[in-house]
Image (cartoon, rainbow, N blue to C red):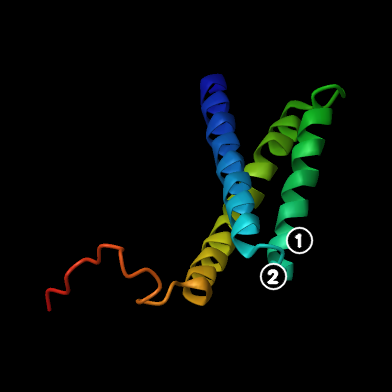
Amino acid sequence: MYAAWILLRLALLAVVVVYFVLYIITARRLHGRKVRRSTDIVFWAVVALAMIRVFARFTPLSGLTYRLILVLPGIAAGVGIPGLMSELTRLKADIGEPADANPERVRSPKLN
């Protein structure tokens, strides 16, 4: 049972890392424009839960409470990833290049 918690913790840590990478990509694609408010709220919730996770290591807690604190940032990031993905797809639709932007670019043939 102990090994399962280690694997779960590492998997959810990977989810948090993916969330932060997606957030950075979304922020860079915006070029100073505002991200949706729900995306910002989830970002700060993940940051706060991650900080609680770091500081929980130094406090005496019961086993179940400590494990719950380890799992919560990953769950919050998992909830936030679809929001970031929809933000990225909306950005691609808004910022998409026109077809004649670069005439030297090789275009894929339309087969239908």
Circle on res. 80: none
Q: Residue flagged by tag 1: what amino acid is it?
A: Ile
Q: Residue at x 32, y 70 (%)?
A: 103
Q: Is residue 70 above or below residue 19?
A: above
Q: Does residue 101 appear left or right of residue 24 in this picture?
A: left
Location of mark 2 (residue): 36
Which of the labelled discs sits on residue 41, or is there none? Answer: 1
Disc 2 residue type (three-letter): Arg
The front one of 83 and 34 is 34
The percent coordinates of residue 61 (x first, y second) are: 83, 27
| Whole-number angstrom distance, CA of label 1 to CA of label 2 | 9 Å
Identify the residue at horizontal 81%, vertical 37% (top origin).
52
Instruction: Name the image quarter holding residue 106.
Output: bottom left
The residue most toward the front is 104
Q: Residue 20 in the image: x percent, y percent?
A: 63, 45
What secondary structure is marked by label 2? loop
